[in-house]
Image (cartoon, grey):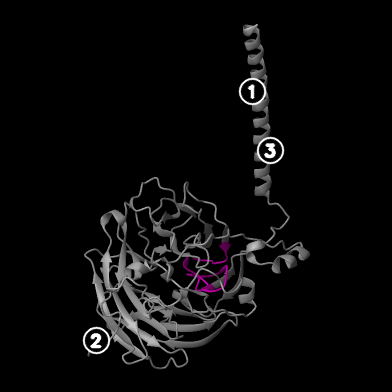
Amino acid sequence: MFRRVVRQSKFRHVFGQAVKNDQCYDDIRVSRVTWDSSFCAVNPKFVAIIVEASGGGAFLVLPLHKSGRIDKSYPTVCGHTGPVLDIDWCPHNDQVIASGSEDCTVMVWQIPENGLTSSLSEPVVVLEGHSKRVGIVTWHPTARNVLLSAGCDNVIMIWNVGTGEALITLEDMHPDVIFSACWNRNGSLICTACKDKKVRVINPRKEEIVAEKDKAHEGARPMRAIFLADGNIFTTGFSRMSERQLGLWNPENMDEPISVHEMDTSNGVLLPFYDPDTNLVYLCGKGDSSIRYFEITDEAPYVHYLNTFSTKEPQRGMGYMPKRGLDVNKCEIARFYKLHERKCEPIIMTVPRKSDLFQDDLYPDTAGPDCALEAEEWFEGKNGDPILISLKHGYIPTKNRDLKVVKKNVLDGKQSRNVENTSPGHKTPSPAPSIKHEGKLDEILKEVKSLREIVSSHEKRIAKLEEQMSKIHN
C-alpha cells in the first residue's frame, strides 16, 4: 500500500497492543443502532459507551479504573426517549458530556466526580430545536459551553449551553444528510461532509460557506472530513468503484486535492482520529478488525502510511483518548477503546524507546482542559487558540466546576440583560420558579412536616420512658 523508499520517521515503529482481559470492560451490550458514529467517548476520567436500552436511549459512563465484568444493573445515563446516536465529552470539564438522540434532542449531563451510583435521567439542560434525529454532537475546542449539533433535518445548530439557547442555526446549506462536522483548531471554522458528496468549509458566525469541493469522493457511501492543525482538510470516502479512499485538501484551493490514496475495497466507513501534536491520523473502519495509521507531512506524498494494527474481532465503534490521558512514562502516544459486541477493549499505541527520560519530541505541549474564551466572547467574534500544557510530569486533573445553566426570563428584560454580562460559570438563575419547582417545594414541605410529627411523637415516648425508669429506681 503506497510503499516507496523507506523514509525516516520517529513513528515508523509505533506498535499497538491490546490490554489483558482483566483490563477490558466486559459484558456490555453495545448499541446496535445503524448509525456511523463512534459509539464511544473517553477522557482522562471516564469511558462512555452507547448501549442497547429498552424503550429509550442510554449510555454507560464508567470510571477508567472500573474494568472487568460490568454488572447488568450498573447505572446508566438514560434520559432520552429514543436511541442515543452520538456522545462527546466536554474538553474543558471532564464531568460534562453531551448526547444526541433519535428523539430530536441534545442533552448535556453532569457526571458525579466518582462516577454514577444510580441511574441519571435528569440532564443539566435539554437543547431542543432539531426536527429530526440528532446524529452529531461536538464541543467547541477552545470556548467554554459552545456545542455544535447536526441533525437529519440537514441543519447545524450552535448552542450556548450556559443559557440553553441556539445562537446560530445553519439551514439551507446542506441539501442532504450531514455525515460529519468538525471544528478547526481554534474553532473559527467548521468543515462538513454531506450526502450530496460535497465537503464544505463554513464560517459559522458569518453563516457563510467559504470553500467547498463537489465530489471530494465520488462513491455514494458516507464520507468524513476533519481539520488538521495546519488548516488543511483530511477526508475519507469511497471511489466510484467503491474503493475506500483518503484525501488531503487545501481549503484555499479545493479544485485539486493535495493528495488522494486508494486503500482497499472494504465497505465499512472509515472513522479518522487525529493527533494535532504529532500529525498522525488513525483510521478505524466500522466493521474492520484493524487500525491503520499515517503521518502527514509537507513533503510528497504528504500522507505517509506507517503501519496497521490488526486483531481478529471486528470493531463496532471506537473511543480515542485525549493526549492528556496517556501514560507518558511508557511512551504511549495514543489509546483507543475498541467496542466489540459485548465488551470494550483498550488498545495502546507506543513508540519503543530505550531511555526512561521524558521524550519531549513525542510530547510537545498539548491542549489542556482550560478554555481560551467564554461562550459570549466567541459568539461576539473573538477567537482563541487552545491553551497548551506540558505533559512532562504527567497530567494532574484539576477540580471541575459544575455546569450551571441559566434560562433567560423573556418577560423580565432587566434580568436577561444582567445575565448576559456574567460568565457562564457564575450565572444567577431567573427568579420565576417553574411549576415543577413549586411541586417539589410542596413535597419537601410535606416531608418536613411529617418529620416534625415523628420527632415530637418520639420526644413524648422518651419522656414517658424516662418517667417509668425514674419510678423503678425510686
Give how far apart the Cα atoms at labels 3 and 1 are.
20 Å
At label 2, counting other C-alpha atoms closer than 10 Å, the crowd grade (few under 14, some 14-19, many 20 or more) is few
Camera-near label (2 vs 1) is 1
Task: Give how far across and how far down residue 135 sits, in percent.
Answer: 45, 67
Task: Give how far across and how far down residue 271 sits, in percent.
Answer: 36, 73
Secondary structure under badge 1?
helix
According to the picture, the residue beneath numbered tag 3 turns out to be 445
Q: Nearer the viewer, residue 469 or 316?
A: 469
At label 3, counting other C-alpha atoms closer than 10 Å, the crowd grade (few under 14, some 14-19, many 20 or more) is few
Q: Is residue 381 magenta?
A: no
Question: Quick check: marks 3 and 1 in contact, CB under 8 Å?
Answer: no
Question: Quick check: marks 3 and 2 in contact, CB under 8 Å?
Answer: no
Q: Is residue 150 magenta?
A: yes
Q: Which residues are magenta?
A: 127-156
Residue found 45% across the figure and 82% down from its top: 229
According to the picture, the residue beneath numbered tag 1 turns out to be 458
Residue 2 disc label: 2
Q: Is residue 66 rendered to the left or right of residue 137?
A: left
Q: Is residue 304 rendered to the left or right of residue 48?
A: left
